[in-house]
Image: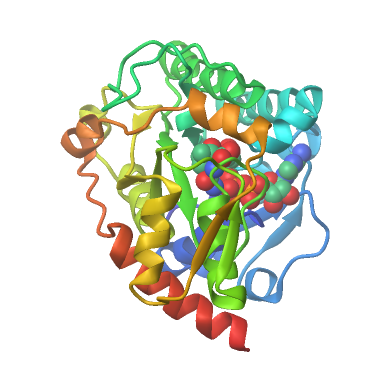
Amino acid sequence: MRKIFITGALGQIGSELTLHLRDIYGDDNVIASDIKADCPQNISGSGPYEVLDVRDSRSFSELISKHKVDLILHLAGILSANAEKNPQLAWDININGLYNALEISRNLRCSLFFPSSIAAFGPSTPMDNTPQLTIQRPTTIYGITKVTGELLCDYYHNKYGIDTRGVRFPGLVSYDTLPGGGTTDYAVHIYYEALQKRSYSCFIKRGTYMDMMYMPDALEAVVTLLEADPARLVNRNAYNISSMSFEPEDIALSIRKYLPDFVLTYNVDPVRQQIAESWPNSLDVTAAMEEWGFCPQYDLDAMTKDMLEKLGVKLSR
Ligand code: NAD
Ligand code: AKB
């Protein structure tokens, strides 16, 4: 059985991925970690939890040895909007944290999963049906750390034979844990405020398309890639994945199918708008489908239905 160590496990992805992986691989085989000392009971009560700053290479390495880990899922990081507020911190955590994870993987012979992002593309990238292999000249510090991460993972695979794998996640929509300071966060906040206030003031401009995916499809994609036959993984570190592309009016229309009085207004944030405009409108996900069977289930309306149901229950507690 695999021994899996997750960094940044209390974030939007990790808080759900930890529990999903514990269901599959066994509670004791999935060690969650985060820089935060306060860990929710559903994570700390169902399996091991360690406090770790991924920049502390000695503690990181000791934990990997202590738990006899063979696979690191490196989720710790600073997302796009927060990264623009403090680019030096974003570089430190996103790059030095990843470097530590890669060096530990080399020294202790672990496999490594690293999530890249649609942010790894930039304004000179073809915007529609963005190819798997294309121009990558991002203009955000977050995107620069993601391209660097993709290349570092390629390097460690080619030079040291480390089994590195990764995807370029689109914006992820979920109801369990709020997103951690990104540009696509509006697509989560809109559901909360639709239920709580029947209105939402959007910081992204009408007509701005970005790729998105519902969290259950993201969790399934990670497991499918981790279990994939390595011989088939040509683009192993940075698969384009996505299941929908929409702009704010599309998600408002979808919400109105269930909440007809929902009102969408705009109060555009220039920083996040500029970031959004530098990212693709829609990705070509053919490589992920062909090389490891990526097969998302949720389109926009299916996601809206499930989000409103599950979030409604959560908010009424
Ligand atoms: P998040 O911001 O919700 O969570 C990140 C976690 O990392 C937080 O719990 C935070 O406490 C932790 N962290 C921050 N600095 C740390 C440090 N120095 N040491 C240890 N932990 C630290 O992010 P997320 O949405 O869960 O994203 C996880 C990864 O997936 C990130 O690399 C992100 O870039 C990538 N990603 C996310 C999305 C998305 O829409 N959620 C999309 C594309 C890529
Ligand atoms: C962000 O908006 O920063 C993230 C991402 C797409 O990487 N959700």
Quarter holding the C terminus is bottom right
Q: Is 126 on the left-hand or right-hand side of 31?
A: left
At which x and y percent is residue 108? 59, 32
Identify the residue at the far bottom of this view. Answer: 317
Q: Residue at x 49, y 15 (%)?
A: 151
Above or below — where is 145 with respect to 211?
Answer: above
Q: Is residue 62 visible?
A: no
At which x and y percent is residue 245? 34, 43
Q: Is 30 on the left-hand or right-hand side of 253?
A: right
Above or below — where is 54 with respect to 86?
Answer: below
Q: Residue at x 43, y 62 (%)?
A: 25
Q: Foreground residue, 117 or 222?
A: 117
Quarter holding the N terminus is bottom left
At which x and y percent is residue 200? 58, 61
Q: Is residue 206 visible?
A: yes
Q: Quadrant of residue 40?
A: bottom right
Q: Foreground residue, 299 or 20?
A: 299
Q: Residue at x 80, y 34 (%)?
A: 56
Identify the residue at the far left of this view. Answer: 290
Count of residue discs:
0
At which x and y percent is residue 113? 48, 37
Q: Is 63 on the left-hand or right-hand side of 264?
A: right
| Ligand 2 in which quarter | top right
Q: How is the image coloured?
A: rainbow
Q: Residue at x 63, y 75 (%)?
A: 42
